[in-house]
Amino acid sequence: MAEGVPAAGRRGVEAAALAAGFSTALRRAGLPGSPDRAGWLAQALRLVPPTDRGRLYWTARVVLVWARDQLPVFDAVFSAVFDGMEDPAGNRGDANLPAPIGAGERTRAAAPDHRPAATAGGVPARQPPVLSSGGGTGDESPGTGRDAILAMASAEERLRGTSFADLTAEEAARMRELVRRIVLSTPARQSRSTRRWAHSSARLDIRRTIRAARRSGAEAATLVYSRRRVRPRRLVFLCDISGSMEPYTAVFLSLLQGAAAGALAEAFVFSTRLTRLTRQLAVRNPGVALALAGAAAPDWAGGTRLAESLRHFVDRYGRRGLARGAVVVVLSDGWAQDAPELVAAQMARLRRLAFRIVWVNPRKAAPGYQPLAGGMAAALPYCDAFVSGHSYAALAEAAAAIRAEAGFHPPM
């Protein structure tokens, strides 16, 4: 193995153990992140083996750092873990210490100049700033440069792929605004009411034809055709607000708020009991709507009575029409206090009423995830779609599952 390889790499430590240990050290140092990122780092280390210190640094940095202000903490923890420093905080500001990797300038062959030519006024066309590895703006002399390996995307574009659990308070507020604008559509259904149709390819409407003949006082002069009206199916949300779902609840409620503004959408939340929030979330002001929702659900961040909440919904609302022919979306990680057989029994009842059941579980995004939780394993056979919905980009898959035309297909 070449010189400069981290001690952990020389000993042949597994990628999963290395990723878990390093991610834990970052969280202890104050760098925000979720356990999912440790799995992403382990997968990245398998694809890019850390044969030397530089490769390990850049692989970990690309996966675990998403803002420039996090670089000092990341560099300090990286040096502490892989350079043998005892305490990063105790050595902060020591000018005698070697600069952390990526902070120094490196000479390299000049790259071809692909910048656009100067404009007619002699002013070169504006170039987007390049973030260098050391935090500069990329204004070095032509003979030298900094390795800009980590490309920073725009704030909104980066948020699209970030897990809701990894968002800061400011980012979560922006995300809630983005999610609130999502327009969810459901498959169409034929209603019992009909409307007149001029084309003869429609069904002959005998009643309208006879009524037209009676008004004229003679035999029917013209035939009247009609078709059934087409309306969108009802959309019903059942959102888990228990403690295990707390990192995702606020964003999911914004999704419910956008859906509740429609005439054929219903929103429910559950933890230890079921609460209907359609009226509260239909308020135009987002802050007022969330405040009303929080006041209406006293069991916020409690345990999860999944089977009992499903039973309550089917008995009080589902059989009275809210779930009949509707698309039911359950947002939950499936961690329930109820016995799995009770969850399966209530899901079977819901299955007989709903047109489609879409289950959104943010834990599904974790590498190697298996639906082993008792409630999730019991509910999955009755679901038409099983998606993660852990990020803004992942919600596109959930939206596609909601508007799918197909009905129930038993899992293989």
Image (cartoon, rainbow, N blue to C red):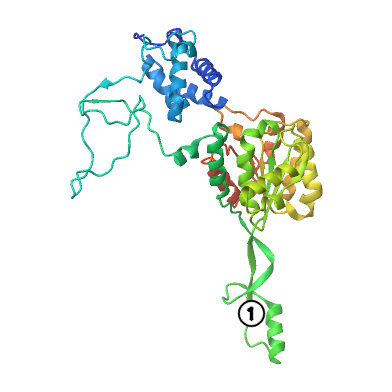
Residue 391 lies, in percent from the top left, at: 54, 38
Q: Position of residue 299 (x, y in %)?
A: 76, 37
- Work out which residue is located at the far bottom of the displayed protein and give it: 217
Crowdedness near tag 1: few (<14), some (14–19) or many (≥20) residues, C-alpha within 10 Å = many
In this rendering, would 118 be left or right of 11? left
- Foreground residue, 178 or 169? 169
Q: Residue at x 69, y 38 (%)?
A: 240
Q: As rendered, which of 380 and 5 lies closer to the eye?
A: 5
Task: Quadrant for residue 197, please give it.
Answer: bottom right
* Whether residue 46 can be seen here: no
| Residue 189 locus on image (x, y percent) | 64, 59
User: In the image, what residue type sits under mark 1?
Assistant: Val
Residue drawn at (74%, 33%) of the image: 304
- Identify whether 3 is placed above or below 215: above
Q: Nearer the viewer, residue 121 or 24?
A: 121
On screen, residue 99 above or below 168: above
Which residue is at 35% across, 24% downward?
A: 134
Indicate the quadrant containing the N terminus: top left, top right, bottom left or bottom right: top left
Which of 247/377 is in front?
247
Q: Is residue 268 left or right of residue 67?
A: right
State which quadrant residue 302 falls in.
top right
Q: Is residue 80 left or right of residue 286?
A: left
Residue underneath mark 1: 224
**In what element is the residue under mark 1?**
loop
Q: How many discs mark residues in the rendered view?
A: 1
